[in-house]
């Protein structure tokens, strides 16, 4: 029982950065913009988040630093892809290359330092309930926030007028523009939201997951988040399922390594990446009838005047 | 008053020609600011980066050695990008090529195997790189899975596989437990062009690849097809060109070139298989491809330039304690400026005065 609880706890922790980054990217993509720079925004968020927490001693300030850093990175993307109508795939790649370099530069001074990780919730009585207590009432704030964020995004996209307009921009930017909606401004906000989420997701890693910063610590999570958005068919509900499934794969392979299954550890470590490829193939195949992606995803829009 | 982007009536030839130069210029200006922020003398830093490596023979050779894999990979990537196929997993194909070729080197180690070893390694590496690149290509064509994500995921898989081999079955028993194979035999080593120097046969192979790509794109129907499918997919469909075939073909060719570059790096400058054989060649090659405007000769120049930044970065680290990550930041910023300047080939900025437009509308 103890072990089951421990596994569920670690799955939730491993899933949270994926869920945060993927939620942001989902909103960005729903507005019609494909920002492939999630990995770059995350790693800069991780470096700046750790720097913020280390300098001020506050996890909250660290998280804010991460959000701010991710947003700044996404603004570079918006300037290029929306302002200058540059190919979004190439711009996203450039953002990741730049992010890896910047995070190394910012984080170099903090390698080897440690902080006190984010505190876990503790409600006397509730948190002590066997099996479910710590899972439901003993998480850190990031875990609860990520779930609240998905619910909020679902509500925004499907229950508000602004969400409807954002989806309209993603499906047909020409019509949205003709109706008088400021397509590029809406997309800029969507990109910034994606950046903020990616920055927070990155900051989660050194602030709560492991209490120190190492270069390249995002280890492809930004790319997996991108795959999760495809997995979810651009729907927040399925995103939660996907993020926790991937978190589970990551944790199970770690435990399997610990149990000494006779498979080399490198093969187990490769599992999350291979699973991503297989899932992408299976899903794309199942959807051969028609794509569920926003129709204008990744296309350049320069308004006529 | 507002600054807006609008499409040019036709693409600007002048800007197409000078845009890489403007991009390099803007990058250098940005770097001066960055050096100043880091508290380093910008002029000395620029000298260490861009001038010092050009002044001694050893560094010049080293630039050519670093440019060799960059140019080979970037040529392959440019074919993909021209055909609108997004292979961003060249790093993985590079590693798999290195692994496959090393297999022959490891198996023939200490035997009296003859001169066939190196050619066999090169062929096997190219084949393995091509096969590895075909995984995302086939997933894309058969199942519609995003080749961007699958090709990138396979980079991590290749990296872990190489790590397993050199820590497990292929580890040098006399290597003091370091994760590396034994040094390759002379028959499994890429010959040097200058005795006692660093320049090796790979540089010649890279030049041949550039020439072959220039002929393919400029003089053959296949090259024409690649360019049309990327630039005008609808027209290509009406012309009977099959985009799917070209995705497969360009991925296979770029995978083969990346794999070849991988084994040349291992059997040449490195001399054995170990983790970290690539300082991100597969990703830097993306920048090389774009900076070279997806043109073979442009890629040759761009590859030499980015190789210069690798060498310059190392020298600046030694001489001025400038962190190596500055080189990556430099490369990222350069790609941004290249893409931004390229955008001005097709678009231009114009100032509009909204008030006047409204006035005209109400009249």
Image (spheres, coloured by chain):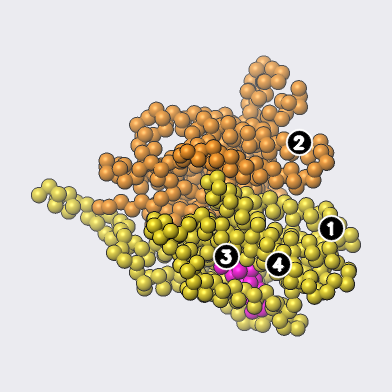
Chain colours: A orange, B yellow
Does residue A112 lie above or below B65 as drawn? above
Foreground mark, 2 or 4, reads: 4
Disc number at residue B123?
4
Distance in Å between CA atoms under marks 3 and 4: 16 Å
Is A204 on the left or on the right of B356, as rendered? right
Residue underneath mark 3: B76
- Select label 3 or label 4 by which is in front: 4
Question: Of B104 and A273, which appears nearest the observer?
Answer: B104
Q: Which residue is mark 2?
A: A255
Query: Residue B13 falls in which quadrant of the image?
Result: bottom left
Q: Residue A102 location in percent, x, y? A: 57, 56
Question: Tag 4 or tag 1, which sits nearer the N-term?
Answer: 4
How crowded pointer 3 is (Cα within 10 Å; few <14, some 14-19, many 20+) is rated as many
Q: Position of residue A280 (x, y in %)?
A: 58, 42
Q: Which residues are magenta?
A: B60-75
Asked whether B79 falls inside the magenta stretch, the response is: no
Q: First in sequence: mark 3 or mark 4?
A: 3
CA gap, disc 2 to disc 4? 40 Å
Q: Residue at x 49, y 28 (%)?
A: A151
Q: Earlier in the sequence, mark 1 or mark 3?
A: 3
Q: Nearer the viewer, mark 1 or mark 4?
A: 4
C-beta proximity under 8 Å, tags 1 and 4: no
Residue B63 position, x and y percent, is: 63, 75
Question: Up-down: is A156 above or below A132?
Answer: below
Q: Chain of mark 2?
A: A
**In the shown orientation, is residue A302 left or right of residue A282?**
left
Query: Percent from the top left, x then y, of residue A113?
Result: 69, 47
Q: Which residue is mark 1?
A: B171
Q: Secondary structure at mark 4?
A: helix
């Amino acid at each position: 029982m103890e072990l089951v609880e421990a596994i569920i706890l670690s799955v939730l922790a491993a899933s949270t950065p994926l869920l945060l980054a993927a939620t942001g990217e989902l909103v960005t993509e729903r507005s019609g913009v494909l920002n492939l720079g999630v990995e770059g925004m995350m790693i800069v968020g991780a470096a700046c988040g750790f720097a913020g927490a280390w300098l001020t001693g506050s996890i909250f300030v660290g998280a804010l630093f991460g959000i701010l850093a991710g947003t700044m990175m996404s603004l570079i993307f918006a300037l290029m892809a929306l302002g200058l109508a540059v190919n979004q795939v190439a711009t996203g790649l450039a953002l990741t290359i730049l992010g890896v370099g910047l995070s190394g530069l910012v984080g170099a001074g903090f390698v080897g330092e440690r902080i006190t990780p984010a505190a876990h919730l503790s409600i006397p009585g509730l948190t002590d309930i066997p099996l479910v207590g710590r899972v439901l009432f003993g998480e850190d704030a990031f875990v609860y926030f990520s779930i609240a964020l998905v619910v909020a995004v679902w509500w925004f996209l499907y229950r508000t007028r602004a969400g409807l307009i954002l989806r309209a921009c993603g499906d047909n930017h020409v019509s949205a523009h003709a109706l008088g909606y400021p397509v590029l401004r809406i997309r800029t906000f969507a990109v910034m939201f994606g950046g903020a989420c990616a920055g927070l997701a990155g900051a989660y890693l050194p602030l709560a997951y492991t209490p120190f910063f190492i270069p390249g610590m995002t280890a492809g999570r930004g790319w997996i988040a991108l795959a999760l958005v495809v997995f979810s068919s651009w729907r927040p509900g399925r995103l939660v399922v996907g993020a926790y499934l991937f978190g589970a794969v990551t944790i199970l392979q770690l435990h399997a390594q610990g149990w000494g299954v006779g498979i080399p550890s490198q093969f187990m470590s490769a599992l999350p990446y291979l699973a991503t490829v297989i899932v992408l193939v299976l899903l794309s195949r199942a959807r051969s009838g028609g794509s569920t992606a926003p129709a204008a995803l990744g296309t350049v829009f320069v308004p006529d005047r | 008053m507002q600054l807006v982007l609008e499409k040019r009536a036709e693409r600007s030839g002048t800007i197409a020609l000078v845009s890489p130069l403007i991009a390099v210029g803007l990058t250098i200006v940005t770097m001066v600011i960055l050096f100043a922020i880091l508290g380093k003398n910008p002029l000395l830093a620029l000298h260490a980066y861009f001038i010092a490596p050009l002044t001694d023979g050893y560094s010049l050779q080293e630039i050519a050695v670093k440019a060799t894999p960059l140019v080979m990979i970037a040529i392959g990537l440019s074919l993909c990008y021209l055909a609108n196929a997004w292979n961003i997993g060249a790093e993985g194909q590079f590693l798999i090529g290195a692994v496959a070729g090393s297999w022959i080197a490891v198996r023939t180690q200490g035997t009296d195997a003859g001169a066939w070893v190196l050619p066999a390694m090169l062929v096997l590496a190219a084949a393995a790189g091509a096969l590895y690149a075909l995984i995302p290509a086939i997933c894309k064509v058969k199942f519609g899975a995003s080749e961007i994500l699958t090709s990138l995921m396979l980079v991590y898989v290749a990296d872990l596989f190489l790590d397993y081999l050199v820590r497990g079955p292929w580890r040098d028993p006399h290597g003091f437990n370091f994760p590396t194979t034994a040094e390759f035999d002379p028959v499994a080593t890429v010959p040097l062009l200058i005795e006692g120097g660093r320049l090796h046969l790979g540089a010649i192979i890279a030049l041949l690849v550039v020439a072959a790509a220039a002929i393919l794109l400029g003089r053959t129907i296949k090259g024409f097809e690649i360019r049309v499918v990327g630039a005008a997919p609808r027209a290509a469909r009406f012309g009977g060109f099959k985009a799917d075939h070209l995705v497969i073909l360009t991925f296979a060719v770029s995978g083969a070139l990346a794999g070849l570059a991988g084994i040349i790096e291992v059997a040449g400058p490195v001399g054995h298989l170990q983790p970290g054989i690539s300082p991100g060649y597969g990703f830097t090659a993306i920048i090389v491809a774009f900076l070279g405007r997806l043109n073979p000769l442009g890629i040759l120049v761009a590859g030499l330039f980015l190789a210069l930044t690798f060498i310059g970065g190392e020298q600046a680290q030694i001489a001025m304690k400038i962190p190596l990550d500055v080189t990556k930041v430099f490369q990222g910023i350069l790609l941004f400026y290249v893409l931004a300047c390229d955008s001005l080939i097709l678009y231009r900025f114009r100032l509009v005065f909204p008030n006047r437009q409204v006035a005209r509308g109400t009249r």
